[in-house]
């Protein structure tokens, strides 16, 4: 359940990073009566922020088939590894 909540939070954050700058630019354009300058700038900034967050998320997600850190080993594997490293020939 905690993994689903974390993933949901990340997806929501990335969605807001992509959408809010464009909406804010649209609001600024409507208020000041400008050509859609701020809307375009907001969309570009939002796209850049969203892509940076997606790249960060993708690089932090372990790929299928990769092992985690050594803390995932069972106690018997850890103790046998440490014993084999301490043996002298």
Image (cartoon, helix red, strand yellow):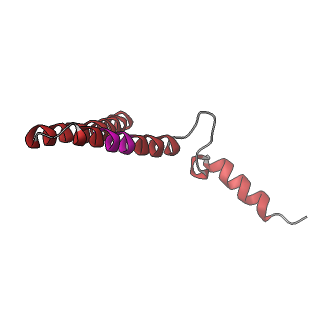
Task: Report the residue at 36% width, 45% height from top.
Answer: 49
Camera-nearest residue between 45 and 61:
45
Task: Report the residue at 8% width, 41% height from top.
Answer: 31
Task: Give above or below for 72 relative to 18.
Answer: below
Q: Is residue 26 magenta?
A: no
Rendering coords of residue 61 (x, y %): 50, 41
Quick one: which residue is furthest to the left in this view? 31
Q: Give the image quarter of residue 8.
A: top left
Q: Is residue 45 magenta?
A: yes
Q: Which residues are magenta?
A: 43-50
- For the question of whether residue 71 can be seen, the reply is yes
Task: Report the residue at 66% width, 53% height from top.
Answer: 78
Camera-nearest residue between 13 and 39:
39
- For the question of whether residue 20 can be seen, the reply is no
Rendering coords of residue 80 (x, y %): 72, 53
For residue 28, side relative to residue 57 (left or right):
left
Quadrant location, the C terminus: bottom right
For residue 39, side relative to residue 46 (left or right):
left
């Amino acid at each position: 359940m905690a993994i689903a909540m974390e993933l949901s939070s990340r997806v929501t954050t990335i969605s807001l990073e992509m959408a809010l700058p464009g909406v804010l630019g649209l609001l600024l354009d409507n208020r000041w009566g400008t050509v859609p300058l701020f809307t375009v700038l907001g969309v570009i900034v939002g796209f850049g922020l969203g892509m940076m967050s997606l790249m960060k998320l993708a690089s932090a997600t372990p790929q299928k088939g990769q092992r985690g850190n050594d803390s995932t080993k069972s106690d018997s594997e850890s103790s046998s590894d440490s014993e084999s490293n301490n043996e002298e020939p």
